[in-house]
Amino acid sequence: MLLAFWSPKGGSGTSVVAAATALVLARRRACRLADLGGDIPAILGLPPEPSNGLVGWLSAGPVGAPAGALDHLELRSGPNLGVLPLGGTGRLPATIPPEAGAALSVVLAYGKKKVLDAGGADHPGGQAVVEVAGASVVVVRGCYLALRRAVRHPLTSKAAGVVLVDEPGRVLTGHDVSEVLELPVLARFPLRAGVARAVDAGVLACRLPSALLQPAETLVETFAGVTAGRAA
């Protein structure tokens, strides 16, 4: 199953949540993390973003760049985690057609466990990847602007739930977020200074803070149950 994380508002922490979830999965089995947000290599302390990545695959389409071509794009982050970088200029072009996004989602769904950082999913190609994914999760902070955008976003009604990034001083609670979006809050990732330092230093892969580890484990367990139910 492909688990896609996306956010209607930039800076919500989608890439960190996706990276933490993939790292927890990789402790159990082989996992692949696909990056449409453009920040995953830096977060995991990998070499500079290569020019060739998912942008090239999506631009060529599944005929010009078959499923096996993704293997040649993969960067290794530890023995069990492979990263598919965005490449290009570090931003998903608005010209990527929905058909290419849907094809990527289908290809990623097979084989090893997959996590997708879909970023803002603000272009047709990126939205299509999320729409076809096995499950999607909205990442938001407890702020009015984020909820306002999420309510209006076409992907929200198709999401399995919400990840709430808990920011000190916010008035809106997890209950408020759940009520407004009509989705369950699946996990809460607290903002901590230690998390920011680990992200800035690019050491999440070897020093995953407990503030990320615990909620990421909750997500992994939640979707392990979903996968087992579908298999049954």
Image: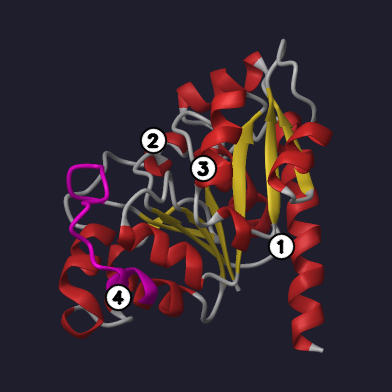
- What quarter of the picture does the N terminus occupy? bottom right
Closest to the camera, between mark 3 and mark 2, is: 3
Give the CA separation, mark 3 to mark 2. 19 Å
Residue sitting nearer the eye, 195 or 119 = 119
Q: Quick check: is 91 in the magenta stretch?
A: yes
Q: Is residue 159 left or right of residue 199?
A: right
Location of residue 127 in the rendering, given as x and y in whole percent from the top left corner: 41, 59
Q: Amino acid at mark 4?
A: Glu
What residue sits right under mark 3 in the picture? Answer: 7
Give the CA separation, mark 2 to mark 1. 23 Å
What's the residue at 51%, 76% (across, down)?
109
Location of residue 22 in the rendering, given as x and y in whole percent from the top left corner: 59, 53
Label 2 sits on a secondary structure element that is helix
Label 1 sits on a secondary structure element that is loop
Give the CA separation, mark 4 to mark 3. 21 Å
Q: Amino acid at mark 3?
A: Ser
Relative to 43, residue 75 above or below = below
- Look at the image and tell me whether residue 19 can be seen: no
What's the residue at 60%, 34% (across, down)?
147
Among the two numbered marks 3 and 2 on one chain, the one whose residue lies closer to the N terminus: 3
Label 3 sits on a secondary structure element that is loop
Among the two numbered marks 3 and 1 on one chain, the one whose residue lies closer to the N terminus: 3
Closest to the camera, between mark 2 and mark 1, is: 2
Among the two numbered marks 2 and 1 on one chain, the one whose residue lies closer to the N terminus: 1
Q: Which mark, by number, is residue 99?
A: 4
Q: Amino acid at mark 2?
A: Ala
Among the two numbered marks 1 and 4 on one chain, the one whose residue lies closer to the N terminus: 1
What's the residue at 62%, 24% (across, down)?
143
What residue sits right under mark 1 in the picture? Answer: 28
Q: Quadrant of residue 135?
A: bottom right
What residue sits right under mark 2 in the picture? Answer: 42
